[in-house]
Structure formats: structure tokens, C-alpha cells
Image (cartoon, helix red, strand yellow):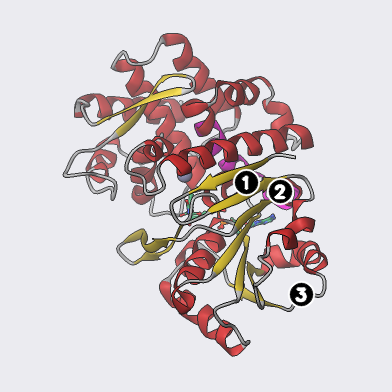
Amino acid sequence: MPSFAVTTPANTYTCLVQRGALSRITEFVPAKAGKLFVVTTEDVWDLHATRMLDALGTRECHTILFPGGEPRKRLSEVETMADEMLAHGADRSSLVIAFGGGIVGDLAGFLAAVFMRGIGFIQAPTTLLAQVDAAVGGKTGANLVGGKNLIGAFHQPTAVVIDPEVLGTLPEREYRAGLYEVVKTGVIRSPRLFGRLLAESADVLNLEAEIVEDIIAESVRIKAEVVSADEKESGLRRILNFGHTIGHALEAETEYSLLLHGEAVAFGMRAVTHLARDMEVLGAEDHLRILSCIDAYGPIPPLDGVKASNLMKRLVKDKKTIQGRVHFVLPVRVGETVITSDVDPAKVLRAAETALEELAA
Ligand SMILES: NC(=O)c1ccc[n+]([C@@H]2O[C@H](COP(=O)([O-])OP(=O)(O)OC[C@H]3O[C@@H](n4cnc5c(N)ncnc54)[C@H](O)[C@@H]3O)[C@@H](O)[C@H]2O)c1
Ligand SMILES: [Zn+2]
């Protein structure tokens, strides 16, 4: 059974990836933990409450229903949840269980980070995006009016329990959006993962149990390795931003309403793959393989009306822009990248234009 350790200066924790893993969740509740607080959304609870409640058995627990959605990923919701916890007898020994997608994970993690100055929490992610990415690594937080995820804390979970069986109820578009993050992981660090995604896309899209478990496990293995090497994103962790620099600009440009995050990343990966080719950092063969792999999980929704020049203006405003320089993660070959800020803006513009033209074609 695949399980991976994340080691940070603060703690070491396990990420378990296994069909039926939720039934084992109490193995990860520390012996000294008091009351459990499951933070979830109504849709996830309607579909999967039995799995969680059966697993928790006779443990004392209270469910906090959060309305969900990016506009509600706000500090005020964290305060509401904290009040609800207190009203239901929470204390410093209480443990939060984040049971939902990345929004629930980020918000419930932040709640755990600040409730009584920090209590434990378990991530039990239910979207593919949260399973392969958001739940691992301890980034928690909420949105400000001025931008996404601008308030938050690093707070590593006590454990991450990943059960691929819950993905059966996920809307297909959400599933594909998560797969783009898996493609990202393959491109940056795993030729084996990339090879399976390219050759076996039909099985992946059909949710064949064995391959789904394997691609999640490989993604989590890599995320765990990268976070363990660089928790606070000062070095290696930045490779996880492949496709994200242009992706974030596109999300902002389309007002966070047209695209799912993974879809914006897919566009960003296409653009930056063109950029790497144009800069002669990436060879012709891998250029085509990366584009084909992204396309296998498409389509990216149409982007009529989006202008490459507007994306360029957004790029410099990205929160990861360091001293005015935009950093790009460029693929060198499948499994290897280089990070550089030494990029001709005209080439970035051309790469974004090419990616937009291809979508329109
Ligand atoms: N902390 C990190 O490192 C990190 C990394 C990437 C993304 N994120 C954050 O994650 C969020 C996006 O997460 P997401 O894509 O999971 O979106 P989400 O949390 O909004 O979930 C998508 C939708 O699917 C529903 N859902 C969840 N599980 C389901 C299931 N098993 N069956 C049916 N429906 C289900 C949710 O209720 C929601 O409506 C963003 O806010 C982003 O900032 C955080
Ligand atoms: Zn992402």
C-alpha cells in the first residue's frame, strides 16, 4: 500500500494513498486527540458521509457544513467555523478533519492553524486536484478581495488520507482539471508517470481503479519529496509552478469564472512549452509529446476574447513575481525543468498568442 512521508522542520507525517483508505482514518488520529470536527460541504457530505461516519465509529465528532465555492473562501468563514467549534466544546486537543476539495482543505487547514493558536488536522481530500496537490504540503489560507490565497499560514497536517474511491462521484470536468496537475507532475519530475498518462489516457479517463491509484500515488510521492526538500518555496518547490505563471494570469483575466484552476494551468503549460521550444531549451520531440499529453485530457474551454497582451500585463502582478522579475518554469525534457527569469517578453507574448490561436483553431 503506497504511503509517503513528508518531513518538515516542524513534523513528519504520512500521506496514505489507497482504495478504501478512509476506512482507516482513525489510525491517524493521535491517541491524545479529543473531539473531532469534520469540515465539509453539503454535496460531499450527502455523497460520502457514510464512509466517514462508519470509519469514525463511536468517536465523538461534530460536522461543520461550509457552503463551498471560491467566493466563500474567506477569513470570515474561518471565524464562523471557529465559533461553531467552540459552541460544540472544542479545546486545544480537538482535531479538524478537512473532508472535501481544495477549498475545504485550505480553509479547514487555516482554521486548524489559528484555532487556539494551532491544533492538529487531517486532510481527507475528495477531489483529484486536492488529492494530488492541495492536501499535501501545509499551505492553508483564504482569499482577500484583492486576490486569491493572500492570507494564510503554513500549517502541516497530522496526516493525509487519500481514498481514490470517492472520485467516482466527481463531475467529469473537475476530474479532468485535476488530471492536468498530474500531467504537470509528470512533466516536471516523472517520465514514468508522464509515459502512463500519454499511453493510457483512455483508462485514466475511465477511472480504471489500478491506474488512478498509481497516478495519484506517484503525484503524492513527488509532492511529498519536493515539500520535504523545500517547505516554504524558496527553491525546489517552485518547480510545482510549471504552467502556473501564465495560468494565474489567465485565471485573473477571466475573472476566476470561466475556467477551473487546472484548465488555466493546462493553458499555461501549453504556452510555456511553446516558449521553451522557442528558446531552444526544449527539443522538438518532447515539445510535441507534452502538447499531446495535455490535449489527451482536453478540451480547454474556448478563450474567445482573451488577449495575449492583457495576459502579459497581468504577469508582472503575480504574487510570485520577485522584485519585478517574472520567473518561468521551463521544461528541458520530460522529467526535467529549469527556472529562469531571463526571458525575452516578446517571446512570452508570442508563446501566449500561439497557445490562444491553437485553442481557437
Ligand atoms: N494548498 C495548496 O497547496 C493548494 C494547491 C492547489 C489548489 N489549492 C486550492 O484548492 C482550491 C480548488 O480546489 P478544488 O479544485 O478541489 O475545488 P473545490 O474545493 O471547489 O471542489 C470542486 C467541487 O467539487 C465538489 N466535490 C468535492 N469532492 C467531490 C466528490 N468526491 N464528488 C462530487 N463532488 C465533489 C466540491 O464541493 C466543489 O463543488 C482553490 O481554492 C485553490 O486555491 C490549494
Ligand atoms: Zn495548481
* Residue 291 magenta: no
Say few, some or many: other residues with alpha carbon within 10 Å of mark 3 (under 14 / 14 to 19 / 20 or more).
few
Which residue shows up at 63% across the image and 68% down it? 41
Residue 179, horizontal then vertical, whole percent: 59, 37
Q: Which mark is residue 128?
A: 1
In what quadrant of the picture does the N terminus appear? top right
Tell me if the residue at label 2 has its CB under 8 Å from ligand 1: yes
Q: Is residue 172 above or below residue 345?
A: below
Q: Quadrant of ligand 1?
A: bottom right
Beta carbon of the mark 1 residue lies under 8 A of ligand 1: yes
Label 3 vs label 2: CA separation?
25 Å
- Which residue is labeled 2 in the image? 167
Is residue 323 visible to the viewer in this orientation of the structure?
yes
Q: Nearer the viewer, mark 3 or mark 2?
A: 3
Q: The disc labelled 2 sits on which kind of residue?
A: Leu
Separation of residues labelled 3 and 1 (CA atoms): 28 Å
Name which quarter of the figure residue 313 lies in: top left
Residue where numbered disc 3 is placed: 59
Q: Main secondary structure of the magenta part?
A: helix
| Left-right relation of 165 to 172 | right
Q: Earlier in the sequence, mark 3 or mark 2?
A: 3
Residue numbers of the magenta segment: 168-184
In front of the other: label 3 or label 1?
Answer: 3
Compare residues 68 and 190 and report the one nearer the observer. 190
Determine the image quadrant of residue 212.
top right
